[in-house]
Structures are given as C-alpha cells and as structure tokens.
Amino acid sequence: MNRKKPARKIPNPSDFKAAFCRRTYCNQKQIGVIFIAKLVVAEKPSVAMSYAKVLGATSRKDGYLEGNSYLVSWCVGHLVELAPPNVYDAKYVKWSIADLPILPERWQYLVSASTKKQFGILQKLMHRPDVDSVICATDAGREGELIFRLVYQQAGCKKPFSRLWLSSMEETAIREGFQKLKPSTEYDALYNAALCRERADWMVGINASRLFSCLYGQPLAVGRVMTPVLAMTVVREAAIAAFVPEKFYTVDLELTSGCTASSKRFAQKEDAELLLSKCRKEGRATVQKMERKEKSESPPQLYDLTALQRDANRLLGFTAQQTLDYAQSLYEKRLITYPRTDSRFLTEDMAASLPGLVTDTGRAFAVEEPFPIHV
C-alpha cells in the first residue's frame, strides 16, 4: 500500500512572531520578525535603576536600560509643560490689562528646553516597533500621573499602557507591583485632578501677575499658592512686630520637699507683694487637695509630608523643600515609605515589608539589635 507523505506545513509569519515574543532585541534583517518588549517609564533616573535591577534590564543605553524583555527609561521632572501666552497669540508678548483675562480654549504644551534630549529618547522608545505596551512607573501620586500622561500624549503614543503603583522601593514590593499592574483607566480621575491643578496655577499666575504688574508699574509674581502663603506670613510678621509685652507678677514658694508652688499671675505688683507677705506670716503651706490620674497615651501617628516638614523645620531648621528632597532621597534608598502623601497611615499590603524596612533603617544608624515589630 502506497501512502502519501503529509504535506509540509509552511509556518505562518504571525505564528513565527508569537513564538519569539518576549525578547527585546529587534534585528531588521530577520525576515520581518519583530521581537516584543515593554517600555517602563519612571520619574527619576535613580528610581529607574532600581526597577531595572529587579526586572533584569542591565544593558546600559543612552537614556535608558534594556534587557529581559524590558526597556526602562525615565523622565527628568516635568518634560512637558504648558505653553506661555505668546504661543496662543503674539500680542501677549506685551503685558496689557486690556488683554486680560487670558483663558485658552484649547490648551497647548511644549517640551521643556532643558529636557528635550530625554523627551526625544522617550518618544523614540514609545514608537519603536518592538514595543507593544508602556508601563507608567512614575511616582504614585497626582504629579507623577501628570508627568507621564503629558509625555505620552506629547509623544503621540497610542499604545496601551498600564500603571505601576508602589509605596515602597523594596525589591519584593517592586517585583509584586510589576506582577499586579493596574489598568490605566483606574487613574483617569487622578490625572484630571492634576490637570485642574496645573491649569488653575497657570490661569492665576499668568493673569494675576500681569494685572498687578501693570497696576503697580513693576514686575510682581502672583501665584495660587505662593501669594496666600506670603500674605499669611506678612500678617503674622506684622502681629509679632505690633506685639506689646505686658508685665505680670507671680509668687513662688520653695517647699522643703524640693517642690515649688506658684501663684496665679497678678497684673499689679502690690497684689503679688500682699500675697507674699501673707505667706511669710503664715510660715507653712498646707496641701488641701491632691489628684492622681492614670492616663493612657496612644503612640503618635506616622508622619505625612506636612507634619514632617513642620517638625524638621522646628527641630532641625530645614526648609520645606530641603525636607522633601531628603525624604525623597531616603525613599529611593528604600529607608522610608513614599513621602509625597497627606496620609498618616499605611495600607495593608505594605505590612509584610515593614520588618525589613525598619531593620534596614536601624542598620543605617548603626543599630544592630532587633526591633520588636508588631504587624
């Protein structure tokens, strides 16, 4: 019996591509084969390095790292910013009250002159044929969301992107975060809130600065946050300057037990002297009432950024910006949790990372003995 040999199946090019996906190297000579990679966009180079180490992207390139199916790059602060008024209309170059208010109907953006190179790198990476998706890995907050989205839109990227949301820079937390990426749509409201903040700053700053500068004939900077804070500072300084100290008098008795008994304050010296003479005449003091109470005091809450800045200024003389810079540096060294937050609580998913975080922080201060940690 003569059997026919089965026809040889010619592989479909699309199947060939799928068989080799998850590789990062793209060689145009390989008969149309395109290997697939994911682009991770961090907010700062130091954070990108931490991500790349965990992901295995160890090959250094100009403005990014590559390896193990990942491209890891970064922004340098705000790469994209709102355009100045003269971009909307050349007449706004000259400041005039008659042109106010300036309220753009369609907002325009420009790439920051000092960061054009890094933006160009990100734009090329987003449009590389071997990049099938993007991961927003900027800081977990409103501004981090804004920084990425503006770059993504200005670059003209249409590829799908997901969100990495981390509150810790521990390697285990980073690894788990990349395994549990969030849909980008979950953070649309956060992005819209950031847009409102950014555009409110622009409208108040541009219009109010021009208005008051024209009215007073000198350049005056007015800001949504800066000006109210300055006003509160001026009012407080004026109150301090106008303060007139008032004299008062008290009577203090040093008791044989080593304690000191103090009287209430007297506005008139004669009243205090009268009480003192009566005490000297009596020659002894009698405790008429004593109360003892047991109080339980809860441990203080964790710091949010504002409370941390307040105490750092009071105890160490740091400015608010210094405290933020130091806290951000400690966060990137995995010694504290994410600092740019107004929350004084940690999420449940961070509980497992706390023992390691506390131990590492103790070692940074040469404390080797174990800490009692109750999670």
Image: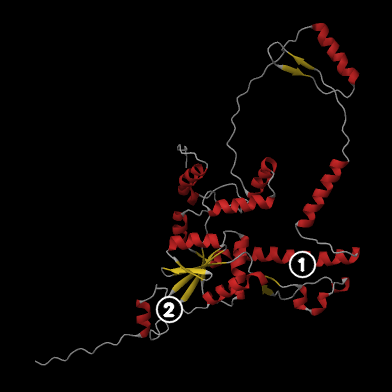
In terms of depth relative to the viewer, which is nearer, 215 or 374?
215
Q: How many marks?
A: 2
Left or right of 211: which side holds 22? left
Residue 275 in the image: above or below residue 119? above
**Marks 1,2: beta carbons within 8 A:** no
Q: Quadrant of residue 215?
A: bottom right
Left or right of 78: which side holds 204? right
The picture places residue 156, in percent across and down from the top left corner, at 59, 78
Secondary structure beneath label 1: helix
- Residue 366 showing in the rendered view: yes
Q: Amino acid at mark 2?
A: Cys
Q: Quadrant of the N terminus?
A: bottom left
Secondary structure beneath label 2: loop
Give the residue at x 74% y 14%: 254
Residue under label 1, please give it.
203
The residues tagged by marks 1 and 2 sit, at their Cα atoms, a distance apart of 46 Å
- Disc 1 or 2, which lies upstream in sequence? 2
Left or right of 215: which side holds 296? left
Residue under label 2, please give it.
26
In terms of depth relative to the viewer, which is nearer, 369 or 160?
369
Q: Residues within 10 Å of mark 2 (few under 14, many from 20)?
A: some
Residue 141 in the image: above or below residue 259? below
Q: Amino acid at mark 1?
A: Met
The picture places residue 249, in percent across and down from the top left corner, at 85, 22
Q: Quadrant of residue 190?
A: bottom right
